[in-house]
């Protein structure tokens, strides 16, 4: 898709930063060339979609979560996400994390995905649990590899441009294997339902899209703060992240080490006949936790943010947001009457 960011470029770029900026330890060029495993993807599809249920129930006639609902052109949001991921990541390197309660809606994935690539949670206990289980599964299947984490409830107009940004993030973590790279969307409005990323003032001097160290996160700010963040050119947190298995695990261990302790019996049971039973026991002791709130906000020094623009991204977390995105882009799904679904706004 694009020329890769090389280790030499990053060595030169970071060396040119003003004195006093934090230093990154970059691997040698030989190490870079010897350590290029294919990237993997984790597609997050375990949520219940409660905020969008008033719309998805009208469309599908049942209680399926939004990721398994055909909101646009007969294609589910999960299918859209998987197709988008496939522009960069091989189908046999895509792991989907789902929840047992939704089996009637994700059932066909059992045969569509490569062996071991369907992670079925006993219950939905938030994004932290789903990410930890999926990271452990990929570690079991492939070891320490670059991973792109992709939520399955996002709408993207320009899939190819979006995945080019993901590819840039993969290039970055190949050179900076201890960092996690976030895709931050160039903000257009003072959104109060999105998380925000506050980047450092100066980008790293590297080729490609602007890349910034992360100063801090803001979760669902007040209207006044959201306007201030927009003025500061802060970024919407897309929750699309790229990092090595070990980098994600290090971030988790630094912030919620008890989660890894809780999951340790499941880690030992991966790939055995006992995995399902052990997973049920582990999840019975979990409280729902957000990966963003419990991990990302606590380790800004381990993160970088790529500024993303002109891809037509939106997070479809609320019916009004779906309707606005469809009208803005001129799309007319078959379920949408000319006057829209006014009762869902």
Image (cartoon, rainbow, N blue to C red):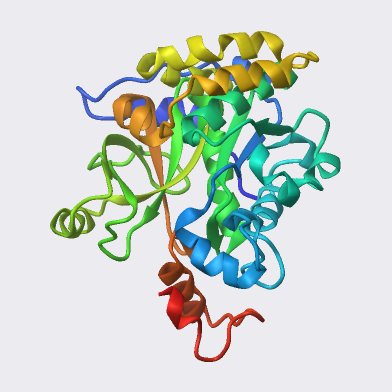
Q: How many marks?
A: 0
* Left or right placement of residue 285 versus residue 295 in this view: right
How far from the left and from the top, in percent, is residue 14? Answer: 36, 28
Nearer to us in this view, 112 or 340: 340
Residue that sits furthest to the right in the current view: 111
Nearer to us in this view, 122 or 22: 122
Which residue is located at x 51 percent, y 76 percent? 326
* Left or right placement of residue 224 versus residue 335 in this view: left
Q: Is residue 157 visible?
A: no
How far from the left and from the top, in percent, is residue 300? Answer: 31, 29
Q: Is residue 85 visible?
A: yes
Image quadrant in which you'd find residue 320 = bottom left
Which residue is located at x 54 percent, y 48 percent? 48
Which residue is located at x 50 percent, y 84 percent? 340
How far from the left and from the top, in percent, is residue 133? Answer: 60, 25
Image quadrant in which you'd find residue 16 = top left
Nearer to us in this view, 200 or 216: 216
Up/down of 319 relative to 222, above or below: below
* Left or right placement of residue 137 versus residue 224 in this view: right
Which residue is located at x 77 percent, y 16 percent? 271
Which image quadrant: the C terminus?
A: bottom left
Up/down of 172 relative to 107, above or below: above
How far from the left and from the top, in percent, is residue 49? Answer: 52, 53
Image quadrant in which you'd find residue 337 = bottom right
Up/down of 271 relative to 61, above or below: above
Up/down of 308 relative to 24, above or below: below
* Left or right placement of residue 239 versus residue 334 in this view: left
């Amino acid at each position: 898709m694009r020329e890769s960011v090389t280790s030499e470029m990053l060595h030169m770029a970071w060396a040119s930063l003003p004195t006093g900026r934090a230093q990154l330890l970059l691997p040698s060029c030989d190490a870079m060339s010897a350590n290029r495993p294919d990237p993997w993807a984790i597609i997050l599809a375990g949520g219940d979609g409660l905020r969008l249920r008033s719309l998805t129930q009208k469309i599908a006639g049942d209680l399926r979560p939004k990721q398994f609902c055909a909101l646009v052109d007969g294609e589910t949001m999960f299918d859209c996400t998987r197709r988008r991921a496939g522009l960069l990541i091989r189908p046999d390197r895509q792991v989907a994390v789902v929840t047992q309660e939704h089996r009637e809606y994700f059932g066909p994935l059992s045969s569509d995905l490569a062996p071991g690539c369907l992670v079925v949670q006993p219950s939905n206990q938030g994004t932290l649990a789903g990410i930890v289980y999926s990271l452990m599964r990929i570690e079991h299947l492939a070891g320490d590899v670059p991973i792109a984490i992709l939520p399955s409830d996002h709408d993207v107009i320009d899939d190819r441009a979006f995945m080019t940004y993901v590819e840039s993030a993969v290039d970055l973590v190949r050179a900076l294997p201890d960092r996690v790279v976030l895709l931050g969307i160039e903000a257009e409005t003072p959104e109060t339902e999105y998380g925000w990323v506050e980047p450092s003032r100066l980008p790293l001097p590297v080729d490609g899209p602007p890349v910034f160290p992360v100063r801090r996160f803001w979760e669902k700010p007040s209207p006044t703060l959201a306007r201030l963040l927009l003025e500061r050119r802060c970024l919407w947190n897309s929750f699309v992240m790229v990092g090595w298995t070990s980098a994600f695990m290090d971030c988790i261990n630094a912030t919620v080490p008890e989660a890894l302790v809780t999951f340790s019996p499941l880690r030992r049971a991966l790939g055995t006949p006992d995995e399902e039973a052990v997973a049920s026991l582990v999840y019975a002791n979990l409280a729902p936790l957000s990966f963003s709130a419990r991990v990302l906000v606590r380790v800004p020094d381990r993160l970088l943010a790529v500024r993303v623009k002109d891809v037509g991204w939106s997070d479809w977390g609320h019916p009004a947001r779906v309707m606005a995105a469809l009208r803005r882009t001129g799309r007319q799904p078959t379920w949408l009457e000319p006057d829209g679904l006014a009762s869902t706004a």
